Image: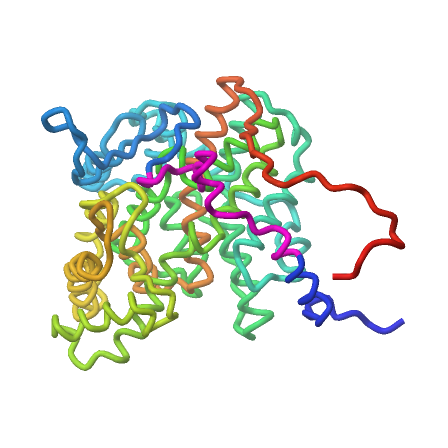
Amino acid sequence: MEHQNFSEITPELIRLAKLSEESNIIDSSLFTRYDVKRGLRDLNGKGVLAGLTTISDVRATEIINGESVPAHGRLFYRGYDVEDLVHGFSKENRFGFEEVTYLLLFNKLPNKQELAEFQELLSAYRTLPTSFVRDIIMKAPSRDMMNTLARSVLTMYSYDDRADDTSLPNVLRQCLQLISIFPLLSIYGYQAYSHYHDGNSLYIHQPQPHLSTAENILHILRPDSHYTELEARILDVALVLHMEHGGGNNSTFTTHVVTSSLADTYSVIAAAIGSLKGPRHGGANIKVVQMFDEMMKVLNDWNDEEEVAVYLKKLLHKEAFDHAGLIYGVGHAVYSKSDPRAVIFKNFVEKLSVEKGLEKEFNLYSLVEKLAPQVIAEERQIYKGVSVNVDFYSGFVYKMLGLPQELFTPIFAIARIVGWSAHRMEELANNGKIIRPAYKPVGYDKKYTNIADRKKK
C-alpha cells in the first residue's frame, strides 16, 4: 500500500471543501431578521449577558447626566483596582503574581503569613512526574508551543489518581498544580523544539524553590539562568496584568462552558488553551512585534510624524505588512479611551528600554500610540474611540527580555491559567446548569432520494 501523506491537500479535498463552503453559507440578512447576536455581541459591540461573576470587572464607561459615555478604562480584580494592586506590591518591592493569584482564587488579599504559606505550596507543586520530560515533552515536539502545552496538560490526567473528581478541594488542588507547572511545561516544550528542530543545545534547568514565578521563568529559559532585577519585576507585572480580564473573553467563556458539563480539570484547561491559541485572542502581541519590525525597516526617520502616519494609513489600506488592514495592538472590544493594562505597563516598559539601550524603539512605539487613533478616526467610521491595548507593549517587553516568539502566547497562558482556575471554581461552586445556547435552524426540509437517483454535483 502506498504511503499516505497526511499533510497533503489533494484536488479532491479542495473540491469537497468548496462543496462544504457552498452548503454552509447562511444569508447574512437572516442574522438581523432573527436578532441573532453574532459573536454574542450586539450591533454596538456590547457583549450579551451570559452569566455573573465576582472575580473581575472591566469598566470603560461612566454615567454623566444619566447617560453612559466612554471613560478611561479600569480593571478590577475581586473589587481591587489593578493599578492599586500593582502600585502596592511594586512600592514594597515584592513580586505580585503569587499574591494576586491568592486574591483571585480566595477573594481576599493574603497577610504575610498566608502569602508565605501559599508561596511554599506553589513551590512544592512546581515539579513534574518522574520521567515526564523525557517520555512526554521530548517525544514528537511540536512547532507550536500552545499545542505542546495542551498535550502536556491532557497527559497529566493519566498521572492523577483523582482526575475526574470535581469536588472543590480536588479541583483547587489540580488548579494550583497546573498554575505551578505551566512555566515548566511551556519552557521545556520550547527547549525540546529548539533542540530537535533548530539544532540548539538542550537546557532543562530545574526550578528553584526560593524564586518567584517570574524569576523561575527566566531562570529555566536562559542558558546561563542569569537575569536582572528589573527584568524579573517587569515580567512579574506582565503576568499580573494578563491573569484575568472578566468572564466574557473567549478562553474564559470556554472555561465556563466546558466546566458546566462537569468535565475534568485537564480537559477544561486544554480547551481554554485551544481558545487562547487563536490569533484573534492570544496571538496579537506577536503580530505587533512583527508589524514594528517591518516598520523599522521601511521608515527613514522614526521620529518623523508625517512619515509614520503615512505608514499607518498604508496598514489600514492593506498596502503594508500582512495586508490585513489592521494596526495591531490598537483597539479593544470594550476599552475606548484607554486600556488600563497598557497605561500601567508603559512606565515599566520605558524603564526596561533604557536598561536595554532601546530608547529609540520605545519612542517609536510611543509615537504610534499617539498617531494611530488619529489615523483610524480619519480613515474609518467608528462607533467608539480607540486606544492601544495591552498587546501593544507586551510583545515589545517580551522581545526586550529575549523571549522567543514561540513563547509569547504560552506566557499569556502562564498568567491566564489563574483566571481560568478562578472561573472554574466559581462555575462549580454555583452548581449552574450546563451551558447550551440556542441556534435557530434556517434550512429547509428535503425529501429523501434513492442513491441511484441522486445527481452528481
In the displayed structure, does residue 364 sit left or right of residue 429? left
In the displayed structure, does residue 309 sit left or right of residue 151? left
Q: How many marks?
A: 0
Residue span colored magenta: 20-45
x, y percent for residue 124: 50, 37
> What residue is shown at x 16% (from left), y 35% (from top)?
69
| Residue toward you, 428 or 389 | 389
- Asked if residue 73 is positioned above or below residue 226 in the image, the reply reads above
> What residue is shown at x 65% (from left), y 46% (from top)?
130
Q: Is residue 418 something one can see in this rendering?
A: no
x, y percent for residue 402: 36, 65
| Residue toward you, 418 or 3 | 3
x, y percent for residue 375: 18, 62
| Residue toward you, 294 or 125 | 294
| Residue toward you, 79 or 295 | 295
Quadrant showing the C terminus: bottom right
x, y percent for residue 166: 60, 24
- Asked if residue 406 is positioned above or below residue 158 in the image, the reply reads below
